[in-house]
Image (cartoon, rainbow, N blue to C red):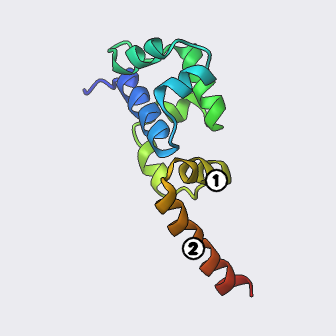
Amino acid sequence: MKTIDYAQISSDNVKLLLSRNGISVKKMAEIISVAPTTLNDSLKSKKGISIDNLIKIADYFKITVTDLCNDKFSESLESEILSPEVFLNKYKALDSHGKKVVTAILNIEFERTCL
């Protein structure tokens, strides 16, 4: 019988959420009120992230701790439509060229679908 490493799964899912939302470990540490080194070490540790911090992270992303411990979580994200907050975070992380491209595409789609 295969044992499930929930610490590794939750750490991987948190890293995935941070990456997809353009949030650094330092910023997330600030959000959940821990030292950046604490969160970084927890993400790398075999012990994983403390339950208190998992709760804070889950609350921030408006998901459950169970979601964070789900080994199929990344698959469910693939089909998820970006929330406006996630889109805005990704947009803010773009360089000026990327922002121009995205803005042009949005303007074209707006004209195509709304006018």
Name the residue carrying label 1.
83
Q: Nearer the viewer, residue 21 or 13?
A: 21
Residue at mark 1 to residue at mark 2: CA–CA distance: 20 Å
The earlier-in-sequence mark between 1 and 2 is 1
Q: Nearer the viewer, residue 95 or 105?
A: 95
Percent coordinates x, y for residue 64 in the rendering: 60, 33
Percent coordinates x, y for residue 39 in the rendering: 46, 17
Amino acid residing under circle 2: Ala
Q: Nearer the viewer, residue 99 or 59?
A: 99
SS state under label 2: helix
Q: Is residue 97 above or below residue 73?
A: below
Name the residue carrying label 2.
104
Q: Nearer the viewer, residue 4 or 100?
A: 100
Q: How many marks?
A: 2
Task: Residue at 47% x, 27% y: name it.
Answer: 25
- In front of the other: label 1 or label 2? 2
Q: Is residue 78 left or right of 82 when viewed as pictured?
A: left
User: Image quarter for residue 113?
Assistant: bottom right
Amino acid residing under circle 1: Ser
Q: Is residue 83 left or right of 24 when viewed as pictured?
A: right
Q: Is residue 64 above or below residue 43?
A: below
Percent coordinates x, y for residue 88 in the rendering: 62, 51
Task: Residue at 33% x, 26% y: name it.
Answer: 4
Q: Residues within 10 Å of mark 1 (few under 14, many from 20)?
A: few
Q: Is residue 84 above or below residue 18?
A: below
Percent coordinates x, y for residue 95 in the rendering: 48, 53
